[in-house]
Amino acid sequence: MAVPKRRTSSTKRDKRRASAWTLKAPELVKCSECGDYKRPHRICPECGYYKGKKYLALD
Ligand SMILES: [Zn+2]
């Protein structure tokens, strides 16, 4: 079985663990129908359009 040759330093270990917790804000694109910001590849929650087609019946 492979065994690590050197003990991982606390700095290296902590940096590795910290990188998994870097949270990123979700990407936002402008809706082509209403111009509002929405998540990409999702139906716009404001007007219900996606790729020029109405998918959600909103009032
Ligand atoms: Zn929209």
Image (cartoon, helix red, strand yellow):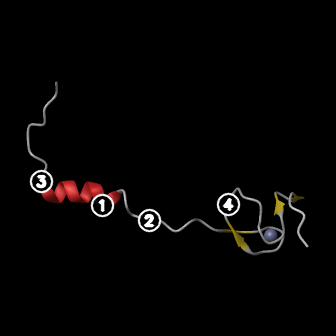
Residue drawn at (82%, 57%) of the image:
51
The N terminus lies in quadrant: top left
Earlier sequence position, callout 2 versus callout 4: 2
In the image, farthest residue toward the top? 1
Q: Nearer the viewer, residue 31 or 9?
A: 9
The residue indicated by pointer 3 is 9
Cα–Cα gap, marks 1 and 2: 10 Å
The disc at residue 23 is 2
Earlier sequence position, callout 1 versus callout 4: 1
Cα–Cα gap, marks 3 and 1: 14 Å
Position of 33 with respect to 26 (left or right) is right
What secondary structure is marked by label 4?
A: loop
The disc at residue 40 is 4
Percent position (x, y) of residue 52?
86, 59
What secondary structure is marked by label 3?
A: loop
Percent position (x, y) of residue 35?
78, 75
The residue indicated by pointer 1 is 18
Q: Are marks 4 and 3 in contact (CB under 8 Å)?
A: no
Find out if the beta carbon at label 1 lies less than 8 Å from the nearest ligand 1 atom.
no
What secondary structure is marked by label 1?
A: helix
Q: Label 4 amino acid?
A: Pro
Instruction: Indicate which label's residue lies in the foreground, 1 or 4.
Output: 1
Percent position (x, y) of residue 24?
47, 65
Q: Label 3 amino acid?
A: Ser
Residue drawn at (63%, 68%) of the image:
28
